[in-house]
Structure formats: structure tokens, C-alpha cells
Image: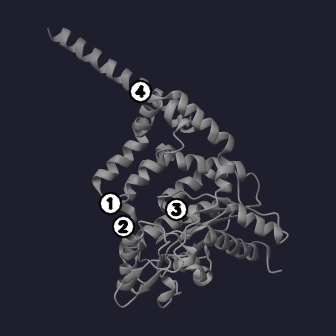
Amino acid sequence: MRNELRRRCTGFVGRLLLGVLLFTLFDSAIFRSGAYFSLIDPNSSTGTLAQVMANAGHANRTASTVLVMGDSRIAEGFSAKAASAEALAAGHAIGFINGAVPGTTPRVWYYMLRRMLHTGKPAAVVMMTTTYHDNETETLSARATDIVFVHPLLQFSDLVAFPSSFPSAADKVSAAEAILLSGYYYKNDVSRLIENPALRVETVTAWNEHGSMWLDDYPGHIESLKGATLDLSSGAVSLPPDAPSGKTARLASYAAELRAAAGRPPENQSSRDYRSLWFGRIATLCEAAGIPLYVLRIPRGPFHFMITQDDATTGSLAVLQRAGRLNLLPAPLFDNLERPEYFFDELHLNATGRVLFSRSLASAMLQRLTGPE
């Protein structure tokens, strides 16, 4: 009886270990190897990241490129095509790459950059920020959507550093699962693939053939908030009749935040720790590759011109700059764009602002990479 029980237990354990081994091999061959990453839906959040990285990898073949990274404010506000044209007109064969993905954060940019540096070495890397102080009002370390974006880029060696960067136990577990069970985070995409594989192949093929052109030729939003006004004393926002629809509530919220903090929320430890960690790790990547790292303050909103400007630099970015680990572009460099006529909503530059910002950033980078004319 005991021998039979022992035999059955041994058989069960053996089958379990074999199942785990087969699952691990399948997970590694299909998902962890990157094979499936090339088939992911280009219209999903992770697919957008994949397409942006593929475009950057295609363009970043030489040391004569400048990689600009950020969230939707760079994706909407920066035209690599306009910036490259500005460089060419100034007599410099330096190209620009838009490496921005909407909804991403410095934690995501770190893992993106780590992968992109395998395909090329740009002349410089530029990262955006909204402030030169440690005063983000959102606790970025708690943004669990970062896991969805970066799970295809994670390695077993990230098993400690990545999960530990999340404050909650639940997110730490999810982050570890994304590393150990990478296929789990593809489950929704796999379901959509199975529903219509022909459409997926057609979509992926189209993006592979034309994606770089589509991204480079994107003109931005033609809508404008020109004529919009803000009463700082009351917070009332007025929009002209031809303003984009559905903007009033979001603009009112933005205006309320602007009034409450006078453009400068208080610094906080969460922001300081997060920026020290992730901008520090990004700086380490660039140092190891011998690439200068620049940080710019993005045009912040359509009514920022109405508040007293605070162009000082404090906290983590100031520490990194003093240590020579990154270079901060002058805070007021893009202040002239913080007006309604250059925005289509409370956060994003429109087509006109996009061209002006791109040309201005190109000029600023050319001065630093090639010296004054």
C-alpha cells in the first residue's frame, strides 16, 4: 500500500515537473524569445511601444541621430521629420528619432532605452519631464500599467529590481509574474489573434512596411485653443465657438490645479525617490554607452504663461546635473509655446506647436552637439 502510494506520488511529482519544464520551454520559445513580440497588435498599448521601438531601431543605425523619448506630450508635440529638416537646413547631417509612447513613464523609458541601445548608438538621448523639481502630484511608482508596457522587455535578471520598484505588494507580485510567466501578459492579445489571424497578419505586415513613414509623417492635431481665456481669480475658462468640443471640463481641471499651486506644487519624497531611481538608471545606461543624456521641460499647458515662472532646478535632477550625469536644457526654453494657440487640449501641442517645438529643440541640440555657428 505504502509502496503504491509512494509510486503514485513520485509519478505525480514527475509529471508536474515535466509540465512545468514544457511550459517554461514553450513560454521561452514563443514569448520570452521575442518571437511573439513581432506579431502583437500594433493598435494596442504594447503594440504601440513595439512599433515605436522598431521605428527607432530602423533609424538608429549610426551615431548621427538624436533619440527623443517621452509620453504622449512628445508623441504629439515632437516631429522627428521637422527636427531633422531643421538640422539639414543648418548644414548638419543629424537625424532625430521620436521614441515617445503615450502613457509611459521614466520607468518604461529605461527598459525601452536598454533594448534600443542594442540596435544602435545615437549621438544623444533626450528625455522629457514636466518639472525641474521633485513635485509630481501623481505617485508614478504606483502606476501598474507600466507592467503592461514593459513585460516583453524584461529579463530574469530584473526579478528583483523591477518588482521592488512598485510600492504595493499586489503590484510587486504582478511585476514578478510578468518576468516568470511572460506569456500570461499576452493572453488578451493571443485571444484577439486567434479570433482573426488574417487581419492580424495584414495589420502587422502593413505596419512593418509603412509604420516608419506613418510615424514620421504624422502632422499632429490641427485643432487649436486660440481665443481661449482663463480668469485666474475665479478659475473660469472661456472657449471660442470654434474650439475643439469636449475640452471644457478638462481645461477647467487643469486651470484649477494651476491656480491652486501657482504653477509649483510642493516637493515630495515619493517624487524625489522615483526620479532619483529612474533618471539615475537612465543616466547609467547612457554613461555605459558613452552617450550624453539631456532632459528638457516640455511645454506644460496653454495657460502657464499667466503664472510667475519658476525656472530654478532643485532636487534629484539638480543632483544628477551637478554630478555630470545628465544635462538640463534651460527651463524657459519652450515657455513661448505655453499659449492656447499652440495647444489642442490642456496637455498636448497642436500641429503648429509641434513644428515650432521640434525646430526649437533641434536648434538647441545642434548647439550642444556641434557647437555655436
- Mark 2 or mark 1, which has the lower sequence index? 2
Q: Nearer the viewer, residue 295 or 291?
A: 295
x 52%, y 80%: residue: 227
Identified by mark 3, the residue type is: Ser
Identified by mark 2, the residue type is: Thr
Q: Nearer the viewer, residue 219 or 130?
A: 219
Q: Position of residue 196 (x, y in %)?
A: 48, 29
Q: Which residue is mark 4?
A: 23
For disc 1, the neighbor class at 10 Å (few under 14, some 14 to 19, many from 20) is some
Q: Which residue is mark 3?
A: 72
Q: Position of residue 347 (x, y in %)?
A: 48, 70
Q: Which residue is mark 2?
A: 139
> Image check: 105 left or right of 173?
right
For disc 3, the neighbor class at 10 Å (few under 14, some 14 to 19, many from 20) is some
Give the colour scheme shown.
one colour
The label nearer to you, 2 versus 3, is: 3
- Mark 1 or mark 3, which has the lower sequence index? 3
The label nearer to you, 2 versus 1, is: 2
The label nearer to you, 4 versus 3, is: 3
Q: Which residue is mark 1?
A: 167
When the figure is inspected, residue 297 is found, relative to residue 188, above or below; the finding is below
State if disc 4 and disc 2 touch (CB < 8 Å).
Answer: no
Cα–Cα gap, marks 1 and 4: 30 Å
Identified by mark 1, the residue type is: Pro
